[in-house]
Amino acid sequence: MSVLNLEKLKNKHFLSLMGNGVISLFGLLQFAILYKVFTKEDVGIWLFFMTTQGVLDSIRNGFLGTATVKFYAGSEPIRAKNVLGSIWYLAFMITGIMIAANATSLLLIPFIGNESVIVSIKWIGLTMLSSLPFLVIFGKLQSDEHYGTILWLRMINSGSTILAFLILIYLNKFDLNNALLWNFITNCLTSIIGLFSGHGGLKTISNRSKATIREIYNFGKYSMATSLTSNLLSASNTYIVTFMLGPGAVAILSVPAKLMELVEIPLRSFVGTGMSSMASAFNQKNMHQVTYIMNKYAGMLTWIFIPLAIGVFFLADIPVNILSSGKYKGTEAANLYRIVMAIAILYPIDRFNGVALDIIHQPKLNFIKVQIMLLVKVVTTFGCITLLHNVYGAPLGGLLTMIAGLGFGYFSLKKFMEFSIADIMRTGYSELILLISKKNK
């Protein structure tokens, strides 16, 4: 491979894409292993635990993730240490509150009859503690645009988990408790490696200040609420469908939901690189550049998703059968995948509208946007399932939710930035053609 090609592989967009690709592909592999080996009951308990962890992560990461990028990226060295130290302090405080609450809930186990809840109570505190360091490490690395380091840390975390699962299967010791244990151990491994490699900046905790902690808190309380509500948007399907149609329908719905993680690979990558670039531009008071970056990434992704949706329309059965080992052949899973992929065409503009609101210091509006989406999601999903009496009501409710969120975010952002849907599509098309032409040289 030529030196030129090696340099292309070091491009931050490629490295971010690879990082998100690793986590998503390993997640799909993990999902396939669990469905093949575990009983349906154990799969259900695992999914309940992961949903609970996701909700708690959305609180902690929502409080600190966006705030780390916003206040740290592009800052002067003294300010950067002050911000990072304050982030570490808040990370310990938030995690400490979660662990204290979890310790109290352990006393309730004798009075709980639901096994999913019992398992979650036993493991959630340890899991949140094990993932604390690399939460801050990843935020710092994203702000510094060190996507190569993020890539190998994610490979260590996800790869070691899959390897542990395969070894346990070979030794005939793969059960729910061992899976949860190794999930905890691999989190610890990633955190320790990140800290001892000098990527965490833990020593900066001595540079924290009350003023910066208060500043991050005032910003983070809105981004946290937004992140939590966004997480509940996806989690609500699990709860609503379980209540109205039963666990079998949830299992069917989970297959296309997992396949949509492939779509999240480019989406998360572009959001990650775009967010840090937008934050740097905003901190340098360059609103024109902020608008350009948003238009560029949202537009490029929209054009990429259109042919993907067309491909899924014709080929949906293939990935559904592969992921589920043929268990869901002939069910609604493939059609659900077609529907949610068509809706995904709207994801990029909606996601970057929300990111832009956070970056220009309007997290309250982004929070209101997600609140509206959650309300619409719950009401329309209940209504659509009630009318249709089947699982197709879930994605139909999702479409109405996306339209509501996209409309509110778009018109809210236009009060602060000069742009339009046409601008997004034109800029995205031009940048995509330019990117393709460069790749072909």
Image (cartoon, rainbow, N blue to C red):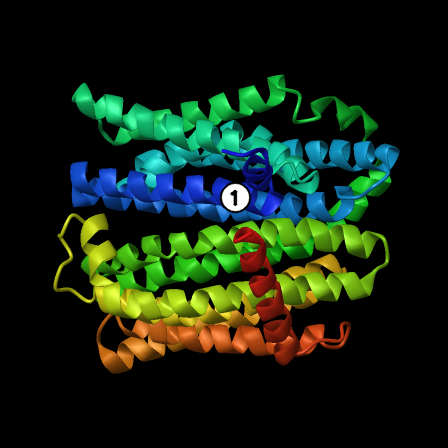
Q: In this view, does 37 lie to the left or right of 114?
A: left
Measured along the vertical axis of the image, is residue 115 above or below residue 395?
Answer: above
Measured along the vertical axis of the image, is residue 408 above or below residue 296?
Answer: below
Q: Looking at this view, is 6 or 252 the one in front?
A: 6
Q: In this view, does 364 lie to the left or right of 370?
A: right
Q: Disc 1 designates what residue?
A: 57
Measured along the vertical axis of the image, is residue 139 above or below residue 149?
Answer: below
Q: Residue at x 67, y 36 (%)?
A: 140
Q: Which residue is drawn at 33% across and 64% down?
A: 240
Q: Is residue 7 visible?
A: yes
Provide residue 187's location: percent of width, then percent of height: 47, 28
- Hey, what amino acid is under mark 1? Asp
Q: In this view, does 165 lie to the left or right of 170?
A: right
Q: Looking at this view, is 77 or 149 the one in front?
A: 149
Q: Is residue 351 visible?
A: no
Dot 1: element: helix
Provide residue 33's location: percent of width, then percent of height: 23, 38
Q: Looking at this view, is 171 or 224 the one in front?
A: 171
Q: Residue at x 61, y 76 (%)?
A: 408
User: Residue 379 appears in which quarter of the rendering?
Assistant: bottom left
Q: Looking at this view, is 362 or 127 the one in front?
A: 362
